[in-house]
Amino acid sequence: MPSKTRKTKKEDILAINDGHRSFFYGESIIENGTVHLIAPFNPIFICLPFLHKTADKFLEIDEILVDENMKRKAPEDDEYPDEKPIVKKPKESIQAKKLQAASKGTKSISAFFAKKN
């Protein structure tokens, strides 16, 4: 019976361009002579520089796969879920303020005529 586990493939797209090159395709000429190739690769090759850099140390995988050039993400225990986020209320537009003022005026006028009965 065949295995039901799926293996995902990782592929690299290579663009080969040596400058000014064209191709004939049927009766037409393709000006952009760039050739694109899709080649499979093993994701372990992404990890090799990190593994090579820490080869003389005994570290856990989370400590090995750290790139100093990337921005630091705070560990989960450093986050403060009880604190309110500092978010400013967006400024109201001038049109929204005029509309609110006009609606207040309309309410007072309609209330004035309603009391006159």
Image (cartoon, helix red, strand yellow):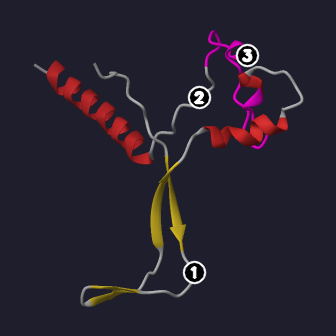
Q: Is residue 51 left or right of residue 41?
A: right
Q: CA distance from mark 3 to mark 2?
A: 20 Å
Q: Is residue 72 magenta?
A: yes
Residue found at x 72% / y 23%: 61
Q: Amino acid at mark 2?
A: Val
Q: CA distance from mark 3 to mark 1?
A: 50 Å
Q: Is residue 7 left or right of residue 116?
A: right
Q: CA distance from mark 2 to mark 1?
A: 52 Å
Q: Residue furthest front?
A: 1
Secondary structure beneath label 1: loop
The residue indicated by pointer 3 is: 78
Q: Is residue 43 left or right of residue 9?
A: right
- Mark nearest the camera among 3 and 2 is 3
Q: Within the image, what quadrant is residue 62 found in?
A: top right
The residue indicated by pointer 2 is: 87
Q: Amino acid at mark 1?
A: Asp
Q: Position of residue 98 (x, y in %)?
A: 38, 43
